[in-house]
């Protein structure tokens, strides 16, 4: 098939063009859907022409591997519930990183020059870190691993040491100094074990609440690793280089935007072990007061203005359809309903928007933090549906682990109703002052059921 | 191409590509952050073509083994990334009036 190899470069160029158009379209709500189709078509043709690479052997193996990996990816992604999407992104991102590390390994086992070898080493390091790091993120979000930060004494020193050793072994892989009587087959496994270990160690101390930022950063990492690996071949693969760099740059910017939305610096996310420490000496005043659905229905039915603040609990309970019903019902009674969307409500930015859009809530009902915060004092009822850390007023108190995080100031509303499964803490594992406020009432139970009861009760009024 | 020319070509390309990535994402509403993260996750699935070449040019059993795993991982990145992004973006599609019910 080598006679068709001239097709490869032009097709790769078209691929990159389609990728850029696809991402461009994905950045606008109206064209977003078509964006992924453009990118998908490009990926398909790029994969097909790659079979025309000169001297390509092991074709059957390649085909089998594509069927296995592609089949797994397709089925798992189709079956998973909408609420579990964040960890699926982490998982697939990790796999991309793993593939990049594998390409580096194969390249370094063969013959490389100083330049291509160095690029392959750096790509391998970043890819391996992204691989194990993303897997830890996946396990934490999936609940197969304790989501709270895992810390131990001397952690930073151990992590730095492991990274330093990984870098040193990487240098040895390229330099192979004659005074050390070891071959590359010795350094290479060592290099990858240390790199993989560093990704693991680096992610363990990061709490579940920070995972969106972490996933986004590993996404940028994988992009970078892919770009570097593009140079590890005898003829550079510019499709990998350009697509990888674009993802690396876009991913980095996205990571910074997310961290900014939480008012946290990246170093704080990675070294802060957020939520690991308990605030000492602050006793919360007041008690938690529960309320029945019927009473909430009365409050809602005679309110002048209602704001709904959704969080991850709404996603877990799949309550968005019921919430939409409640919204329609209240609006039919001429009560304006707005949604307060915290940038990091749920497990990743835009998580709530996605779920509410799924339920058919119009965009113009959704407001972000800065738009909605001034409105809380003039609001009669705020329904907090499964949100916790993003409405915790402890963020205003110096010394709290949440201090400085911009929150939805729901506590300023006349009545705050918190729909919550039980008395547990939020993802960050921090006690919520809001629940103890005088104007707060707790409506316990599954969010979908609770909102359903509210709808029924209001209809009877 | 010598190593040095290749390196400089790489720097040019990297600069332009980084700028493209930055511009494409700089004015995105926060509502699209998740689908875009997922979409860019799909795009770095281009690693699959690299893995295919790595496996296709592999000679020793060790290289073949690593290449085989790399192609599996890359292919999963591609299909999984596509389906996840597609499913998320499906919800933004306002043309079909009734959203599909999740079970």
Image: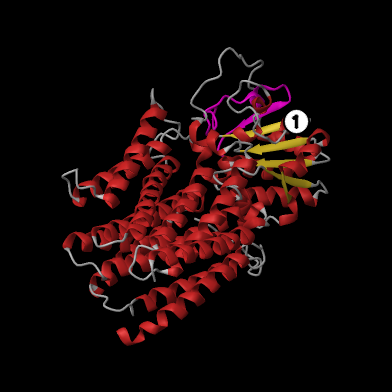
- Residue located at (24% from left, 62% from top): A110
Quarter that holds the N terminus of chain A: bottom left
Colour convention of the picture: secondary structure
Which chain hosts label 1? A
Q: Position of residue A205 (x, y in %)?
A: 44, 32
> Is A101 in the magenta?
no
> Please, what secondary structure does the residue beneath circle 1 have?
strand
Tell which of A48 and A126 is nearer to you. A126
Residue hosting label 1: A415
- Other-residue count near label 1 (Cα within 10 Å), few / some / many at <14 / 14–19 / ≥20: many
In the displayed structure, would residue A272 be above or below residue A165? above
- Residue located at (51% from left, 30% from top): A272
Q: Which residues are magenta?
A: A422-446
Tell which of B4 and B38 is nearer to you. B4
> Is A438 in the magenta?
yes
Q: Position of residue B66 (x, y in %)?
A: 25, 59
Q: Position of residue A447 (x, y in %)?
A: 58, 40
Quarter that holds the C terminus of chain A: top right
- Residue located at (66% from left, 42% from top): A342
Tell which of A82 and A189 is nearer to you. A189
Q: In this image, B53 relative to A441: left or right?
A: left
- Residue located at (37% from left, 36% from top): A201
In the displayed structure, would residue A243 be above or below residue A320? below
Q: Residue furthest bottom?
A: A3
Q: In this image, A5 relative to A338: left or right?
A: left
Q: In this image, B26 relative to A49: left or right?
A: right
């Amino acid at each position: 098939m080598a006679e068709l190899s001239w097709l490869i470069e032009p097709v790769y160029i078209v691929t990159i063009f389609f990728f850029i158009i696809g991402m461009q379209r994905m950045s606008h709500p109206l064209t977003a859907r078509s964006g992924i189709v453009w990118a998908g078509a490009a990926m398909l043709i790029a994969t097909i022409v790659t079979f025309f690479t000169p001297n390509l052997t092991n074709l059957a193996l390649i085909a089998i591997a594509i069927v296995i990996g592609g089949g797994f990816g397709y089925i798992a992604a189709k079956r998973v519930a909408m609420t579990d999407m964040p960890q699926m992104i982490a998982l697939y991102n990790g796999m991309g990183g793993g593939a990049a590390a594998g390409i580096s390994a194969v390249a370094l086992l063969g013959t490389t020059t100083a330049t291509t070898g160095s690029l392959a080493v750096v790509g391998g390091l970043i890819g391996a870190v992204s691989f194990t790091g993303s897997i830890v993120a996946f396990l934490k979000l999936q609940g197969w691993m304790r989501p709270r930060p895992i810390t131990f004494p001397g952690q930073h020193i151990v992590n730095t040491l492991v990274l330093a050793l990984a870098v040193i072994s990487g240098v040895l892989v390229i330099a192979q100094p004659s005074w050390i009587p070891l071959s590359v087959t010795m350094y290479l496994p060592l290099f990858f074990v240390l790199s993989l270990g560093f990704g693991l160690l680096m992610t363990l101390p990061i709490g579940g609440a920070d995972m969106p930022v972490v996933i986004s950063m590993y996404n940028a990492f994988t992009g970078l690793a892919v770009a570097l690996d593009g140079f590890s071949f005898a003829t550079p693969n510019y499709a990998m280089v350009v697509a990888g760099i674009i993802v690396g740059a876009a991913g980095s910017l996205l990571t910074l935007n997310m961290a900014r939305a939480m008012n946290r610096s990246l170093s704080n996310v990675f070294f802060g072990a957020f939520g690991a420490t308990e605030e000492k000496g602050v006793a919360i005043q007041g008690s938690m007061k529960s309320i029945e659905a019927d009473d909430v229905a009365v409050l809602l039915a005679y309110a002048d203005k209602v704001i709904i603040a959704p969080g991850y609990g709404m996603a877990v309970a799949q309550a968005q359809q019921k919430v939409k019903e409640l919204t329609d019902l209240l609006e039919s009674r001429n009560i304006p309903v707005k949604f307060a969307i915290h940038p990091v409500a749920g497990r990743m930015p835009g998580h709530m928007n996605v779920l509410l859009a799924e339920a058919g809530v119009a965009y113009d009902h959704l407001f972000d933090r800065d738009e909605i915060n001034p409105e809380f004092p003039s609001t009669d009822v705020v329904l907090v549906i499964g949100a916790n850390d993003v409405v915790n007023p402890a963020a205003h108190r110096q010394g709290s682990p949440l201090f400085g995080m911009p929150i939805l100031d729901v506590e300023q509303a006349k009545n705050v109703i918190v729909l919550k499964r039980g008395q547990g803490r939020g993802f960050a594992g921090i006690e919520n002052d809001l629940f103890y406020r005088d104007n707060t009432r707790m409506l316990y139970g599954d969010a979908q059921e609770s909102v359903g009861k509210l709808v029924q009760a209001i209809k009877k009024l | 191409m010598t190593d040095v020319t290749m390196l400089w070509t790489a720097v040019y390309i990297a600069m332009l590509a980084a700028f493209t990535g930055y511009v494409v994402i700089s004015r995105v509403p926060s509502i699209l952050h998740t689908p875009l993260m997922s979409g860019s996750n799909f795009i770095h699935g281009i690693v699959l073509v690299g893995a295919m070449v790595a496996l296709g040019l592999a000679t020793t059993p060790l290289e073949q083994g690593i290449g085989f795993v790399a192609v599996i991982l890359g292919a999963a990145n591609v299909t999984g990334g596509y389906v996840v992004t597609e499913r998320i973006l499906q919800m933004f599609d306002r043309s079909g009036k009734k959203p599909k019910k999740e079970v």
